[in-house]
Image: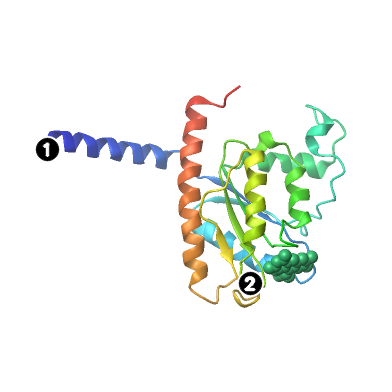
Amino acid sequence: MYKQYIRNLTVQNEKAEMASSGKLKVLLILGSIRDGRQGLRVAKFMRRKLVERNFDVKFFDPVEMNFPMVTKPVHFFGPERTNAPKILVENEKFVKEADAYVLVSAEYNHNVPPALTNLLDAFPGSAYAYKPSGLVCYSMGPFGGMRAAMALRAITGELGCLSVSNIFGIPTVQHAFDEEGNPKNDHMESGAKKMLDQLEWMAHAMKNHRDKVGLPS
Ligand SMILES: Cc1cc2nc3c(=O)[nH]c(=O)nc-3n(C[C@H](O)[C@H](O)[C@H](O)COP(=O)(O)O)c2cc1C
């Protein structure tokens, strides 16, 4: 009885510690720049889901940002970022500050759209490392962009922001949302929830550990 009481107290303390680690920062990255893209609808939906969970959300839309085709990643300008383009220097800060990433990706030729790899590659792996990512993929066909998600698993692994196991895949995306990103079927809510439950847990756990012991040298 007493042992159980102590165990409950410990769990409560751990939960309190987790909650006290503050608002988590999430960087939401949209990977499509195509005219008439479906991806913006998906990203609008995901932004709302993240805000509902009380995340501090920063949204990277390469179209809105007028993000260039990167001929030299920001870290290739040296530790002082001497003469690096302003757009890269300013946005590197958001990549570094984030506690987690949500990548919204279409599937192009069974792979990741070039706009997404262009954006991810612009920043060093160290800016993403020791944090989790969550994958949201979609396509017009029945497979929900899963092949792009598999390729993204390898990329996020290399960047050090491994993706959580649950992937939110959206088949026939053209029927899934209205223009404002309002979902047209129940799968959207449950699919997003499963992935975000894992992402939130991992983001808290990894932030707590980063704060407690720092990073390996
Ligand atoms: C260049 C290109 C390649 C595509 N390749 C695939 C593919 O391999 N698999 C698939 O399911 N859909 C493919 N599609 C269809 C996309 O799933 C669909 O156009 C989707 O809306 C793309 O996302 P976006 O609208 O945000 O650009 C492709 C579309 C484009 C433009």
Percent position of residue 107, x then y: 70, 62
Rendering coords of residue 46 (x, y %): 58, 61
Vertical comparison of 153 with 139: above or below: above
Residue located 61% across and 67% down the image: 143
Q: Which residue is mark 2?
A: 173
Which image quarter is the N terminus in? top left
Q: Which residue is mark 1?
A: 1
Q: Is residue 117 above or below residue 89?
A: below
Q: Quadrant of residue 131?
A: top right
In what element is the residue under mark 1? loop
The residue that appears at 51% across and 43% down in the rendered structure is 203
In this rendering, the answer to whether 8 lies above or below 183 is above
Q: Amino acid at mark 1?
A: Met
| Left or right of residue 9, residue 190 in this image | right
| Above or below: residue 204 compared with residue 52 | above
Give SS at disc 2: helix
Left or right of residue 209, residue 86 in this image: right
The percent position of residue 184, horizontal first and vertical second, equals: 55, 77
Q: Is mark 2 within 8 Å of ligand 1?
A: yes
Mark 2 is surrounded, within 10 Å at the Cα level, by few (under 14), some (14 to 19) or many (20 or more) other residues, namely many
Res 129 visible? yes
- The numbered mark at residue 190 is none
| Residue 115, position as x, y percentages in the image | 77, 55
| Kind of residue at disc 2 | Val
Asked if residue 22 shows in the view, the reply is: no
For the C terminus, the quadrant is top right
User: Is 85 displayed left or right of 14 in the figure?
Assistant: right
Q: Nearer the viewer, residue 151 or 164?
A: 151
Name the residue at 17% across, 38% down. Answer: 4
Check contact, mark 2 vs mark 1: CB within 8 A: no
- Is residue 164 or residue 37 the one in the foreground? 164
Q: Does ligand 1 reach within 8 Å of label 1's beta carbon?
A: no
